[in-house]
Image (cartoon, rainbow, N blue to C red):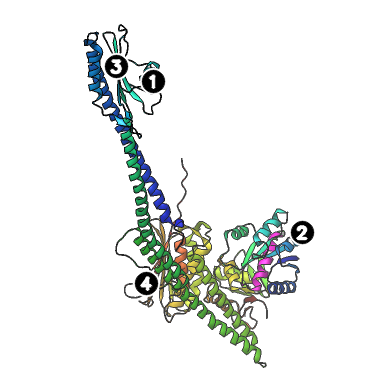
Amino acid sequence: MPKEPRATAAWRISIWTTLAFALGTAIAFSIVYFLVAQGLRERSDTWLTGEAETLAQVSADTPSDHLYKRIVREVAELATQEVPDERNARGERLNSVFFLATDPSNSEGLLWVGPSSEDAFVTAIQRSKLVPGAPKSIAVDGLRETFRVVVKQQSGRTVYLGLSDRGATRMLHRLARRFLMVWGGMFVLGFLISYWSARRTLLRVERITETVARIGTEDLEERLPEPVNSDEISRLAKTLNRMLDRLQSSVNQLRTVTGAVAHDLKSPVTLIRGTLESALCDEGNENWRDSVGEAIEGLDRLSQLLNTTLDLAEAEAGALHLDRRPVDFSDVVRQLVDIYQPAMAERHHEVTANLEEHVVVDADVMLLNRAVSNLLENELTHLPSGCRVNIRLRSHDGSAELVIEDNGPGFPPDISSQAFKRFVKGKHSPGHGLGLAFVDAVAQAHGGAARISDRAGSGAVITLSLPVHVLETVAT
Amino acid sequence: MRLLLVEDDVSIQQFLKRALVEAGYLVDAASTARAGEAMALEGIHDAFIIDLGLPDLDGLDLIARCRAQGSSAPVLILSARRSVDERVKGLEQGGDDYLTKPFALPELLARLRNLLRRSAVPQNESMRLQAADLQLDLVRREARRGEQLLQLTPQEFALLEYLCRNEGRVVTRTMILDHVWRMRIDPATNVVDVHIYRLRSKVDHDTPRPLIHTIRGVGYVLKYA
């Protein structure tokens, strides 16, 4: 198990989930923030416009006598008090609203309600080009927050009403601060939760890894625990267990095969050695040539066993090099029947062959020869004297079918289901049990199949089917 | 006839060299592909015998290099693997031949003779074959022992013809299957022997001087004992 948490997949998974989560919430918050800011702006603009209109009306309606300033100032002060003022850190009062009225006809000029230092505001207003009726944000020298200002003109008098953005800015800042706090919390908590759950899940994988590593180095008996639920990891465990089952059976089979080969090699080696020893020791023996010949025959049988084993190993590993060409299957079978016929007759077997002419298959001719010869060899070695053997070849539904049928004792019931497995043979049958396995491997390599069945009554039927060669039609 | 033998297994090399010298060939032997290539390029050999599993270079690559440098002598390939791969099969179509270990010496010699004959000027095919008092008419497919006409099946005639062509030389069972039936198979049973018994019963029937002899452990030979 990795000691360093940063080297684990759980760590990486949680980092990425947390980042995605944080990004998502940040985007959502930005949208909310923007909407809130817009809402606030609309509200202040509505208030500003309405109030400015009222004030402009009042200012217009009031005759410009000595009472004008008093009346308008009072109305303006009432209006400005609708928005509470704020104090800064030093406790000084900060006006949130200002009101300015100008009258070009009046020599007294400005009417100012608001913060004491009106000059900065007047400069700012003069600097920005305000359009009557459209609120606009203007920056005032010496103040951090901008003012939202609206202008109204009525009867030659101009009224300016300004509202500080201070309140809105404060509110938005507060919102952002709260969000950041919650966001940070969510970030940490989210990371912890996802790390914990990913780690918990991946620890199960880790346990599987450990167990499998142990199985690989020790024995193949152990299996992974299979949880009852069926999530991905349980399926992984189940799949690995099935794989181990197959591996174990292959290994066991391999052990059987190795044992069988060793056993099959031992007796001929002993025999050859004995024959040669006796030829060497027996000085008066004139027939030493016979002994040497016998030894060579034994060696031939040995190399035959080795060759068949190698062939089969290659075939089963899918390593057969197929040199496929159109082959006249009928010809192959006829030639081989011709070769085997006398040997069959010597054992008093009656061989009949019904071969359809010119059944052409796409095959490696050497492998096909050996497969068919193995089938005939099988008949020759396993049948008791005086049987009937019927060999049929026909093409049928795009497949060439070679059927070899006899009226012998058939396959013993204990092997008939697995006669095509290597080293499976009847208890009393000679040979190494490799022949039919090779036939099966060759058939499969060619996309065909080999089957055995018992005949009703008695006897065995072996069928070798291969796909027939498809004539290439010339495209017109 | 001068042969080049490239084989890295010293004991097999020695044994083959002795056997080939006894059969009347001059033999140069090399243990590595490099040494073999140098010798092959002298251009003095009538045929090469090359093992596939050489320590420094694959035997097939050695052949390709020799061919690329203009050497045209026929090649007999020795292979330890039974199902020889496609490249070897390809070479076989190009006129060369291969043998898988273990092999019988007569088979090696027969294949070698074949290769050398193929590369030489084609001989006039004789219409008749004669061995001792056995006469084969290849056109009428008739065989006579002395004066007596033998009743042979076409297969038996082909078998006898093959033995006759190799008069005095041992032929193995695999050679017989290969030449008479064109089958490279290796039966574990006595199928070939039965054919020979039948042929012998006709050819050597009632005669004090049999022609067809069994060489135990190797094969058969047609000769006067």
The answer to which of marks 1 and 4 sits earlier in the sequence is 1
What secondary structure is the magenta-colored segment mainly?
A: helix
- Queried whether the magenta region covers residue A97, the answer comes back as no
Q: Nearer the viewer, residue A459 or A17?
A: A17
Q: Position of residue A468 (x, y in %)?
A: 44, 56
On whether disc 3 and disc 4 are found on a single subunit, the reply is: yes
- For discs 2 and 3, the disc positioned in front in the rendered view: 3
Q: CA distance from mark 3 to mark 1?
A: 22 Å
- For discs 1 and 4, the disc positioned in front in the rendered view: 1
Chain of the residue where label 2 is placed in the rendered structure: B
Q: Please state which amino acid type lies under the numbered disc 1.
A: Ala
The quadrant holding residue A428 is bottom left
The answer to which of marks 3 and 1 sits earlier in the sequence is 1
Name the residue that disc number 2 marks. Answer: B43
Chain of the residue where label 1 is placed in the rendered structure: A
Q: Is residue A384 visible?
A: yes
Question: What range is drawn magenta here?
Answer: B100-119
Name the residue that disc number 1 marks. Answer: A120
Decide: few, some or many residues near mark 2? Use Cα within 10 Å; few <14, some 14-19, many ≥20. Answer: few
Residues marked 3 and 1 touching at CB (< 8 Å): no
Q: Is residue A8 above or below residue A78?
A: below
- Queried whether the magenta region covers residue B104, the answer comes back as yes
Q: Nearer the viewer, residue B127 or A245?
A: A245
Q: Nearer the viewer, residue B73 or A302?
A: A302
Q: CA distance from mark 1 to mark 4?
A: 106 Å
Q: Which disc is residue A417 wearing?
A: 4
Q: Please state which amino acid type lies under the numbered disc 2.
A: Gly
Q: CA distance from mark 2 to mark 3?
A: 111 Å
Q: Is residue A194 above or below residue A282?
A: above
Q: Residue furthest top?
A: A105
- Left or right, B17 with reference to A232: right
Name the residue that disc number 3 marks. Answer: A133
